[in-house]
Image (tube, rainbow, N blue to C red):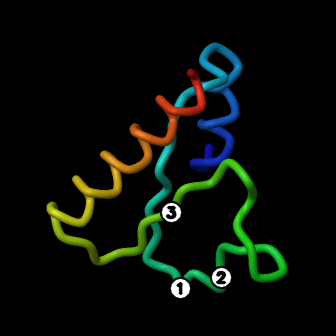
Amino acid sequence: MNGRKLVDLAREKRPDLPVIYTTGYTRNAVVHNGILDNDVELIGKPFTLEELALRVRDVLDRAALKRR
């Protein structure tokens, strides 16, 4: 099972579940016509723990705003 299929299954139970994908591929390899799918958050490898923490905080903050 790939990551997208796992997310689809998880979101059947938790539709509002924030997800960050990680990839070692260039951004161009995972986008469709130059843009990510609307619900896709992405962080490219390699990344530092600080970069990951900042990205997680950003995604969680935006998810909380959507729920208001």
- Element type at marker 2? helix
Query: Could you tell me if the residues under marks 3 and 1 are in contact, i.e. CB atoms within 8 Å?
Result: no
Identify residue type, mark 3.
Leu
Vertical order, 63 against 50 (above or below): above
Q: Which mark is residue 26?
A: 1
Quick one: 23 or 17, which is closer to the camera? Answer: 17
Vertical order, 8 against 10 (above or below): below
Residue at position x 40%, y 38% from top? 60
Identify residue type, mark 2.
Ala
Residue at position x 62%, y 43% from top? 1
Location of residue 17 (image quadrant): top right
- Element type at marker 1? loop
Label 1: how many Cα within 10 Å (few below 14, some 14–19, many 20+): few
| Quadrant of the snapshot with the C terminus | top right
Q: CA distance from mark 3 to mark 1?
A: 11 Å
Residue at position x 60%, y 18% from top? 14
Which badge, 2 or 3, is on the more N-terminal residue?
Answer: 2
Mark 3, residue position: 42
Residue at position x 24%, y 66% from top? 51
Vertical order, 30 against 8 (above or below): below
Q: x, y (%) of residue 6?
A: 60, 36
Mark 2, residue position: 29
Label 3: how many Cα within 10 Å (few below 14, some 14–19, many 20+): some
- Front: mark 2 or 3: 3
Label 2: how many Cα within 10 Å (few below 14, some 14–19, many 20+): few
Asked if residue 34 lies left or right of residue 22, the reply is: right
- Front: mark 3 or 1: 3
Q: CA distance from mark 2 to mark 1?
A: 5 Å
Q: x, y (%) of residue 61?
A: 40, 39
